[in-house]
Amino acid sequence: MEMSRPATPTTNSANAKKVGQYVLLLILTLLVLGPFILGLWTSLMPTADISKGALWSSHISLDNYVTAITTTPMLRYLLNSLVISTITMLFQVLLCSISAYAFVFLEFKYRKQLFMLFLITMMLPFEAEVIPNFSTVRSMGLLNHYAAMVIPFLTAAFGTFMLRQSFMQMPIELKEAADIEGLSHLQFYWRLALPYTKVSLMTLAAYSFLSSWNQYLWPMLTTFSDNFRPVQDGLRQLQGQESFNNWGMIQASAAIVVIPTLIILFVGQHYFKAGLNEGAVK
Amino acid sequence: MMLESLPQNSNSNDPSAQSAPAQLLTTAQWRKDNLYVALFLGPSLLILSVFVFWPMIKTLYLSLFLTDNLGHASEFVGISNYVNLFKNPAYLSSLGATLIYVVAVSILTIVLGMLLAVTAQQRLQGIRFFRTIFSSTMGISVSVAAIFWLFAFNPSVGVFAQISQALHLPEINWLADPHFALLAIVMTTVWMNLGFTFLILFGALQQLPASLFEAAEIAGVGKTKQFFKISLPLISPTLFFVLVVTLIDAFKSFGLIDLMTVGGPNNATNLLVYRVYQDAFLNGNYGLASTESVVLTVIIAVITLIQFKLLGKRVNY
Amino acid sequence: MTITLEQLSKTYEGSHQPVLKDISVQINEGEFFVIVGPSGCGKSTLLRMIAGLTGISSGKLMINGEVANQMPPKDRALSMVFQSYALFPFMNVAENVGFGLKSRKLPKDEINHRVNEALAMVNLSELRDRKPKELSGGQRQRVALARAIASEAKICLMDEPLSNLDAQLRAKMRIELKQLQRNLGLTVIYVTHDQVEAMTMADRVMVLNDQKVQQVDTPENLYQHPHNSFVAQFFGTPQINLLTANVTQCELIIDSALHLPITSSRINNSKVLIGIRPADVRIRVGSQGANARVAAVSYLGDQLVITADLNDSQTIRIVAGSQMQVAPDDLIKIVGIKCFDVFDINSKELISIQKGDVNDARVAAAEF
């Protein structure tokens, strides 16, 4: 599919082909970006114009953003999500990496069986377990608090599995060399294993951050106040209120939520690609 | 939501593969190692036990009981919850809708993702820009996607309504019409899935050795044939991975439905997880909801097991 | 620093088949000791047992007279150079070399001093800030060496350290390694599958095969006095010829057209294995009295290696001067054999060594 082909004798047909390829790319871009562009564009228009079904307005401004920030708890929602996702991310990277380390570099009885146990948890969807989990956090008194949204996700079987794969790809000689130098497990983990698997760690960090950021069902069940409500459920809250028909403001809120994640995504794209493909096929 | 479901999947290696370097272990070291094991595995095990294993057992248990409105088991009924569930036409229609949704989402996601991935392989000026665009829906969360598409589907100001108006086509009230609501959810889900699917498939295509295509070129094999006979078989493990991720993710769909249709109209989009939520948290029927949860778990566990099995053998060429 | 192995054995958990059986040897201070054998013979496992990276199933390992079976690797005061070099990719050259010292909590000045010295010794001082991936294979190898040098351990274990280098570099490094070992007075235990490495560098060589020690000896003795046909076959290029022969009263009949006289009285079997070094065979080209047909000729510059078929399908390799005019399908006559070894056909053990030229008259009996 991608072959650098020698210059064809008929430059015209080559040009036509190129134009065709660009047209295809543009169509696909429109397909992918369409809803997004539409949303961003309308976020700049007054709701009155949007409601008329207009796609153009003479009053393009950031007013909707100002409204969203000043009249709704958007920023509070964002802060909540940021706190929840950051804590979840840090703990997942820590706990997944140490358990993965144990499965690769420590020898102990029932290692295989314990690892199977981790694998089994990958088959059990959290969505099917919300009922008992809800009573658990309720009886722990964690409802309507960051803790309810963080504690169940401090570790992940998937992350453990992924990092175990990366640790296993470290040459055994590195561990042997470290043993000869007399490094303890803690030293080897911190000074060699972690730096060596940096790409996987970054990937896991991005994953856990984004998946925490995108949580919807669980926070919906466990939070009742704007003080702790994360942004996904916050957006839902905005729609439910009297502002339901204030399209411009709602689009602006959506834009406020999406722009930071897009920035993270584009900046971290390199790591993402490498890590995803490793996770997928290695 | 997409990323959340990765846990079920990215296991492509043989899970039982043995690894660690054999080490000299004296008794003293054994004891020390066991300390490390407790320190390193303890926290994860604790959390998984409390929030994964225990709830699973509890759910199984509750599914065999009638419950009071606080969620306590009140009367043991054996498997009759299950029997009733599968006799219930409303549940069966949920199951049917879920299956249609899952299949449609998977097929469309993979076909469109593949189209994007192949198109982005071309060596053209500015192609990197397009690649970035194609992966961008990965950064869009469920509520944002819902807002964008709610707007697009809006019967008075939405872009779909405007297009059909302009073309004098019959107007569709997408989200309020039982015939179209599920399709609307499918479209939104596929759109959300595209970025991730594109990124994975594109990466897999990029890693194929160029020499294979050079050889094919020399042998006079056309581009289309090259794609179907070389690229597709070679990336089959990745394709399979994407398929499983998409399937499992689709089975677990909740957010979009709550945000866009609330299960309606007329239960047309009342998919499995949404029904669990309704029965448990809106109707207070925890026993029934637990039964539904177990069914969902079984479905997902089976898909995951098939994946483990096949990946053990490495889906292949 | 002597290392003594007493009947060391290794059986992996969950397996009944030992990978090493009853290995005994004493390695002396300042010795360049090579462990050689085909892949899978357990030589790397043995090295890892000495290092303490792998447990010892039975037997005794003593370092300086002290039992060290249970001693953790770091307390054995040794360094190790790995085949893959085991460099840490995210550290530069100097950090790699100083890494072990830092984790042993040596003072900073001391670390710097040792790192500088070690790098100077392997001519890497200018590259100290490079990352491993910016180095060539040979340079990485030197970093690994520098790391061992900087540790100042008197025992250095090397696991095929040169096998990832190209042939020319390997030849050069062999000499450098040997010089380094002598200058620093190191006791080196060196694992390789390459007989040339073993022969050129070792003070003594341990030949491992089939989980057992085949022979421990100096390179000369291994070549001149192999204890069995395996050792004989392992050393020397081209390989020694191993031909089966029937034993009669006074002759060893390799072939209807090639007989050798018996001078030793120790041959009691009816069949034996005869080992003949290719260079010890003298031939004449020409059909007259011929007893072999040339199958292939390899030109090596200063010599020819001829592969020839004997009458009854055994083949023999012969080294001849490169001026000899010979081509495939030519008939040749084996006119003399300078010396040969006789091995037991079953146990492959050496029975006797036959010295002195066997001349024309006694070699050829029958004709084509």
Image (spheres, coloured by chain):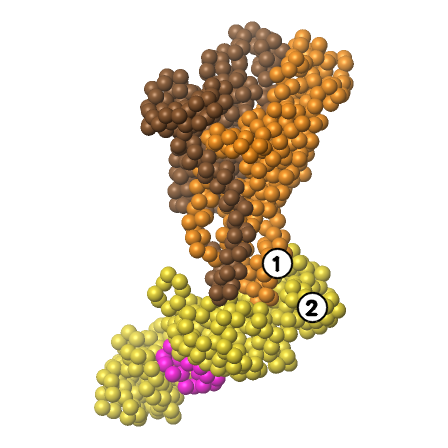
Chain colours: A orange, B brown, C yellow
Whether residue A174 is situated above or below residue B175 in the rendered picture: below
On the image, the x and y values in percent for residue B15 come to 44, 47
Q: Which residues are magenta?
A: C215-236
Amino acid carrying label 1: it is Gln
Q: Which mark is residue B208?
A: none
Q: CA distance from mark 2 to mark 1?
A: 16 Å
Front-most of residues C356 and C281:
C356
Front-most of residues C172 and B275:
B275
What residue is shown at x 57% (from left), y 79% (from top)?
A: C187
What secondary structure is found at the residue carrying circle 2?
A: loop
Report the side of A191 relative to B257 (left or right): right
Chain that bears disc 1: A
On the image, the x and y values in percent for residue A107 come to 48, 57
Residue lying farthest to the front in this orientation: B74
Same chain under badges 2 and 1? The reply is no
Q: Which mark is residue C106?
A: 2
What residue is shown at x 47% (from left), y 24% (from top)?
A: B70
Queried whether the magenta region covers residue C227, the answer comes back as: yes
Local crowd at mark 2 within 10 Å, few (<14), some, or many (≥20)?
Answer: few
Q: Quadrant of the N terminus of chain B?
A: top right
**Residue behind mark 1:** A187
Queried whether the magenta region covers residue C49, the answer comes back as: no
Chain that bears disc 2: C
Amino acid carrying label 2: it is Leu
What secondary structure is found at the residue carrying circle 1?
A: helix
Whether residue C256 is situated above or below residue B112 in the rendered picture: below
Residue B79 visible to the viewer: yes
